Amino acid sequence: MRLPIMKQYNLEEFQFSQSYLFFWDKIERCNFYLNTVVETARRGEPVDGRLVSFLMQSPNGDGGQWDMLVNLIVNHGLMPKNCLVWIIIRIRIIYNNQPVELLMKLAAESIKNNEAVWFGCEVSKRFANKLGLNDLEIHNFKAVFDSDVSLPMSKAERMMYGESSMTHAMVISAVSIDKETEEPTKWRVENSWGEEQNHKGYILMTSPWFKEYVFEVVVDKKYVPASVLDVFNQEPTILPAWDPMGTLAQ
C-alpha cells in the first residue's frame, strides 16, 4: 500500500504509522477474546474442553492473518489520514485451497508485474539465518549423522501431526525464472528482522523449499483464473479453533 500511494501522489518518502495499527490490533484482539469466552460460556462449553483450553493458551497473542489486517484498516483506517470513518465490517478469513504449483505461478506473475507478494510460511525449517537462505539442501545431515534426513511425510501429514505450521509472514519482491522451463527457481524475500539479520534483511528462498514450507500467498484477483475465483462462491468448511491454518505465528 505504501509504494502505490507514493507513486500516486509523487512522494519521495511516505510511511503509515505502525503504532496506530498495533494499538487497534490489541484492542480488537481483546474484544474478540472476551466475546469468544462469553459465547463459549453461553453454549455450555466445558471449561476443561479443548476449545476453552485453546482460547486460554494465548488470549492476546501476536499471530494473525492477512484478513485481520484488512479488518483493522476497514474499521479504523490508516495514519496519517485525518478522515477516519467508523465502519462495522467483519471479513471472514477464507482460504482458497489450491495446489502449491498454482500459488507459485500466481506469485511469479504478480512479481513480474512489479507487485510484491505477502505470504505465510514455516520460516525456521531448513533455514540458515546468517546466510539468509531457505533451501531443502542447506544442511549436510549426512556429514553429521552419517545418514540422509528425508521428508517422509507430505505437507498435509506434517500439519496433521503437529510437525509443521505457519510461523512467520514475509514479502516476496523478486523471482528468478528458468529460461528453458519458464518455471520459478528462487525467490527474493524481504524479512522484518532488521538489516543485521539474514543477508542485509533479505532471504533467498528456493522453489523446492517454497513447495514444502509456504502455506499461503496473497495476490491481486486479476492474476487468478476465473475457475479458482469461483471457489469463493462455495460454502466454506469451518476449521476448528486449533487448526494449524488458524493463526500465522505462535
Image (cartoon, rainbow, N blue to C red):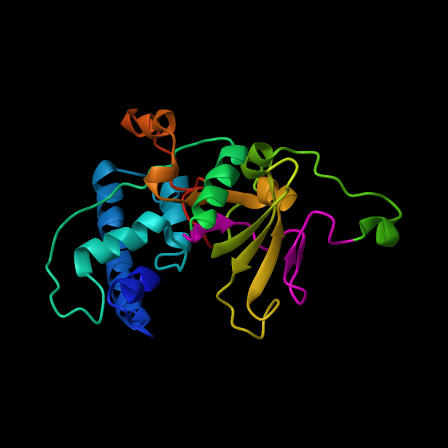
> Which residue is located at x 55 percent, y 68 percent?
201
Image position, residue 46 (x, y; %): 33, 40
Say which of 184 and 143 sits in front: 184
Task: Give the magenta part as a residue range.
Answer: 114-139
Image position, residue 233 (x, y; %): 27, 26
Say which of 195 and 48 sits in front: 195
Image position, residue 93 (x, y; %): 32, 41
> Which residue is located at x 26 percent, y 47 percent?
36
Dominant SS in magenta = loop
Image position, residue 17 (x, y; %): 29, 71
> Which residue is located at x 81 percent, y 50 percent?
141
Residue 95 lies in quadrant:
top left
Tell me if I can see residue 222 in this picture.
Answer: yes
Say which of 167 and 139 sits in front: 139
Q: Quadrant of the N terminus?
A: bottom left
Decide whether residue 40 is among the magenta residues. no
Q: Is 23 on the left or on the right of 59, as rendered?
A: left
